Image: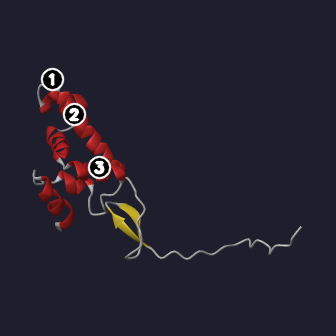
Amino acid sequence: MTRRAPIPETVTLHVPFRIVKRGGRKEMQLPEGATQPRRTDNTLVKALARGFRWKRMLESGEFATIAELAEREGIAPSYMTRVLRLTLLAPDFVEAILDGKQGPEVTLARVLEPFPLEWERQHLDIVAHDR
C-alpha cells in the first residue's frame, strides 16, 4: 500500500463574480470573457407556452374572442394580447429562449413591449437596442 498526502479538510476556491439585481432578483455576473452557463428563464418559457397555447385555443374556435378567453383564464385581455404577440417572435429567437441562450438583456418585460414583426429587425430591437 502506498502512502498518500492527507486530504485537507478545507479547500478554498476563488471565483471572480459580482452580485447584481435584475427585476427584483439577485444574479451572479461573471467577469468579461467568462463563459456563461446556459440558464433557461422559466418566466419567459412559461409566457411563450401560454402564448402558443392561447393562440391554438383561439385558432381552433374553442374561444371566439380574446376577451372571452381572457375571462376564462382570469386575466386582463390587454395582458393576454401582449403574451399572444410572443407567438410572432422569430423561430430562432424562440429557440434561443427555450435553450437559455437569449442573453441577460432579454427579459419578459422587454419582449412584452411592442417589437417589429420582421424577424431580422426583432434581434436589433429586442437585443441590441438599449431602451
* Numbered disc total: 3
Q: Considering only order in the chain, which callout, 3 or 1, is on the residue closer to the N terminus?
A: 1
Instruction: Find residue 3 and report its horizontal and vertical position in percent.
Output: 86, 73
Residue 78, relative to residue 113: is it above or below? above
Going by the numbered disc 1, the residue's amino acid type is: Gly
At a point 13% along the width and 32% down the height, the residue shown is 67
Q: In which quarter of the image is the C terminus?
A: bottom left
Separation (CA) of disc 2 from disc 1: 11 Å
Q: Considering only order in the chain, which callout, 2 or 3, is on the residue closer to the N terminus?
A: 2
Do callouts 2 and 1 mark residues in contact (Cβ within 8 Å)? no
At a point 19% along the width and 66% down the height, the residue shown is 128
Can residue 36 be seen in the rendering of this structure? yes
Q: Crowding at label 2, few (<14), some or many (≥20) Cα neighbours within 10 Å?
A: many
Q: Crowding at label 1, few (<14), some or many (≥20) Cα neighbours within 10 Å?
A: few
Q: Crowding at label 3, few (<14), some or many (≥20) Cα neighbours within 10 Å?
A: few
At a point 74% along the width and 71% down the height, the residue shown is 9
Separation (CA) of disc 1 from disc 3: 27 Å
Residue 120, relative to residue 76: is it above or below? below
Q: Name the residue under label 1.
A: 61
Q: Mark 3 points at which residue?
A: 95
Instruction: Find residue 71 and report its horizontal and vertical position in percent.
Output: 19, 30
Separation (CA) of disc 3 from disc 2: 19 Å
Q: What element carries label 2?
A: helix
Can residue 41 be seen in the rendering of this structure? no
Q: Is mark 1 on a helix, strand or loop?
A: loop
Q: Name the residue under label 2.
A: 54
Q: Quadrant of the N terminus?
A: bottom right
